[in-house]
Amino acid sequence: MKKFWMVTLAVAIFASILTGCGQKPAGEQISDIDVAALGDLGGLEMPLDNKNTKITWIVASSVEGLNDKYAMQALRSITGVNVQLEVYPLSTVNDKVKVLFASKNLPDIIGSGIATMTEINDYGVQGALASVDDNLDVMPNFKKIFKDNPENDWVFKSYQAGDGKLYAMHGYDINRDVNHGVLYRKDIFDKHGIEMWNSPEEFYQALKKLKEIYPDSHPFTSKNGDGIFEKLATSWGIDVSKAAYYNEDEKIWKSSITSPEYKDELDYLKKLYDEGLIDSEFLTLTQAQWTTRMTQENVSFVTWDWIGRLDMFKAQTAESVPTYDLRYGNPIGPKQTVATLPKVFFPITVSNGKNTKLACKLVDFFYSDAGRAFVSMGVPGETYNINDKGVADYVGFESGQKIEITELEEKYGLYIEGMYRGFDRRSSYFQFSEREQEAQDYFTQEGRMEPEDPIPLFTEEEQNEITKYQTNLMTACKEFSTNYILSDKTGDAAWSEWVAKADGLGCGKIVEIYNAAQKRYDAQ
């Protein structure tokens, strides 16, 4: 954040060796790191410990040898804490953590592996996890972001356990403004004089014209299976990831999956399907099949996916389709909006034990400006330098090269899931190509982003009721939605039948619970 540090000649020579491997040989110690050069510590004092206390920390990763990577060795030097990661694959970490809780043999920090806030709160009330409230005195950065900030203090209400305490340390400000959305072949649209759509009708007309020009094409395709209903619903102004959504105009929770807006979305997709404008296999395509469609010259022209595909597909088609130009497009639905990505993201927890205070201090480091820079860029002069554009050039990578966070995890031990609490905005994650930047800039326009739903706090009884109904209800919703589009059982009669079935499966009960919880939340 400020000037980067200088090291002794011997360390500098060794650092040049490090560039090729991203770590020092076993047994080597990193010394002479100018901690001040990392950035603002937010009130923490380094080292955090002068006894080389061992702190164990569960993370999720497929990278081998993380404990020996440069960033981990540097972390030990900076903090004075002997941090040792317990690394499990993302696919198995949840099961492993359950076993550890059952055996009461917990690591000091659980960075990954607890699936829900309900589980966290249960473990907390039982005494296995440390209360955040009781440790705010050693966490100045967390306190500043959440407790002292009126925009974020809701976490203490929304995520508190039955005993009124908070046991989770959520991350903050990791998301880009835009990460997914509708992508379209601008080269094809421009070639035929088709304008960018600004409404469902304009989108329909664009697909219709493309189908006329390319009769054998699948103008709109998807690899999202029945998840496409949820992804498109935002631009109809609803959230169908769960049975209820918050209506900003009326300030109440309403049913999403039986709403008129959802019927409109399904009717619209039904029309596209019946006229051959959406891929006949859009609910069953594999990623490989979808990729083939999207990277051929005249097969598919619009999809919904991650913005990384904009450049990825351009590179894949460099020789086969030199004019290929995939760009971020308008949403499809009538509101023309995309979801606001949450600033508050998945939590980590600290175990109750002899090292609780030190573990809390260690976690708090990653909330500081210095910690955010460290976890996403490393140490200035060693793993990165800030270039004249004000962003990070990573040592060992070509300047201007598009670097994936997995590459930096492999080389240096950066971006470890279950450790980071936020990223520095100068880091690789926020370095966008022209196409990606276009997507970011587009939705800074006023009114393009749907506001986030509030997160009310449910009682244990209410949570049990939601759990009781939600899974079966959402499964039934996806089955109905699929049949509504693919079969002849469609229209008002089929919809009325679905509304009655959904209510019988507990949809109305879930809405009642949300509104009761929201009323209590608002009263606070």
Image: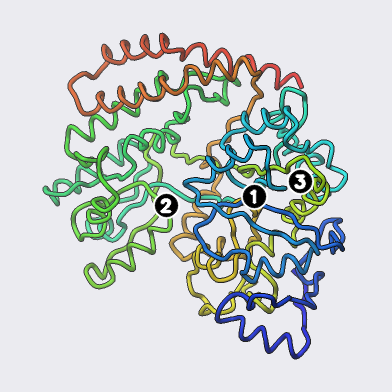
Residue 145's disc is 3
10 Å neighbourhood of mark 2: few (<14), some, or many (≥20)? Answer: some
Residue under pointer 2: 306
Residue nearest the observer in this picture, 313 or 469: 469
How far from the left and from the top, in percent, is residue 436?
A: 46, 59
Give the farthest residue toward the front.
103
- Name the mark on residue 369: none
For marks 3 and 2, the one nearer the N-term is 3
Residue 52 place in picture, x, y as percent: 81, 63
User: SS for tag 1?
Assistant: loop
Judging by the rendered image, the residue that carries numbered circle 1 is: 173
User: Which residue does the image show at 23% across and 35% down from the upper left?
Assistant: 272
Q: Secondary structure at mark 2?
A: strand
Circle 1: is it few (<14), some (14-19), or many (20+) Cα within 10 Å? Answer: some
As displayed, is residue 409 above or below residue 143? below
Quadrant placement of the N terminus: bottom right
| Cα distance in 3D space between marks 3 and 1 | 10 Å
Q: CA distance from mark 3 to mark 2?
A: 29 Å
Q: Is residue 499 left or right of residue 194?
A: right
Q: At 77% across and 79% down in the image, what residue appears?
A: 5
Q: Could you tell me residue 274's position as x and y percent?
A: 18, 32
- State the image coordinates of residue 95 (x, y, percent, origin top left): 52, 40
| Callout 3 amino acid | Ile
Residue type, label 1: Asp
